[in-house]
Amino acid sequence: MSNFHEICKQVRDAAESMLRFGLTSGTSGNVSMRIASLNQMAITPSAMTYDQIKPEDIVGMDLQGNKIKGDRKPSSEWALHSLFYQTRENVGAVIHTHSPYATAAAVLGEPIPMILAESVAIIGGEIPVAPYTTFGTRELAEAAVKACGQKNAVLLSNHGVVAVGKDLASALQCALTVEETAKIYLLSKAAGTPKQIPESALPAIFEAFHNYTK
Ligand SMILES: [Zn+2]
C-alpha cells in the first residue's frame, strides 16, 4: 500500500526533525501518526537511532498493539501512543521526547505555570505533569493521558514529555514549545520567582491565536 509508505516517510521525517532540533539523542523518544481510515498507527521502531531510520523501518500497528506491517519491533512506548489515539479523537500524531529542559522540569514533579503567551495558546494552558510510573507500561500510558486531559502536552515525572497535535507538524511544534517554555521557566526560576500570565489575559491570548492560525 503506497499510502502506508508515504505515512512512514512522514513519520521518519518527523523523527529526524526531533533529532535535528535537539529534542532527543541516541535512541530515546518516539514518534507516531494515526492512520484514521484503518484505525491503526505508524510508529518508530525500538532501539534505532533516528539518523538511521528508513521509511521501511516504521511499524504499522492496530491500536490494540498488534503489528500489521513492518519487520522491526515497535517502540516500547506503543501503548502510550495508542491510548492517546483511542481517547482523543482530534489527535493525529504523538511525539514523546526526553528533551533536556523539559525533562529537568519533569524532575521537579510540578506543572510548568502559564508564563509565555504562545506556549499557553499552543499547549492549552499550564503544562501538566503525570506522576512517576515505569517506562513502557500501560500504567505510564494511563497516567499520561489522565494528566494531559484536553491539553496538547504533558510532562512525565522523572522521564520526559509527550506532545500531541492534529498532525505531525503540530505535534512537533508542540514538543518544541514545551522545550522552549521549560528552558525559560528554569532560567526565570533560577533568577527569581516566575510571574504567571494573569487569568484575565487568557481569553485575549486564545482569541489572538485562533485568528493567527485560521
Ligand atoms: Zn521515554
Image: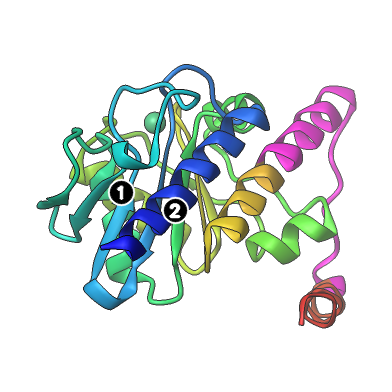
Q: Secondary structure at mark 2?
A: strand
Q: Which residue is mark 1?
A: 80
Q: Please name the amino acid that badge 2 sits on.
A: Val
Relative image position of residue 119 (x, y in whole percent): 75, 55
Relative image position of residue 33 (x, y in whole percent): 40, 57
Q: Which mark is residue 94?
A: 2
Region rendered in magenta = 179-201
Q: Quadrant of ligand 1?
A: top left
Give the number of the mark in front: 2 or 1: 2
Examine the residues drawn in magenta and state their main secondary structure: helix
| Image quarter hosting the N terminus | bottom left
Determine which quarter of the picture holds residue 204: bottom right
Above or below for 124 versus 158: below
Relative image position of residue 124 (x, y in whole percent): 65, 66
Number of disc labels: 2
> Marks 2/1: CA distance?
9 Å
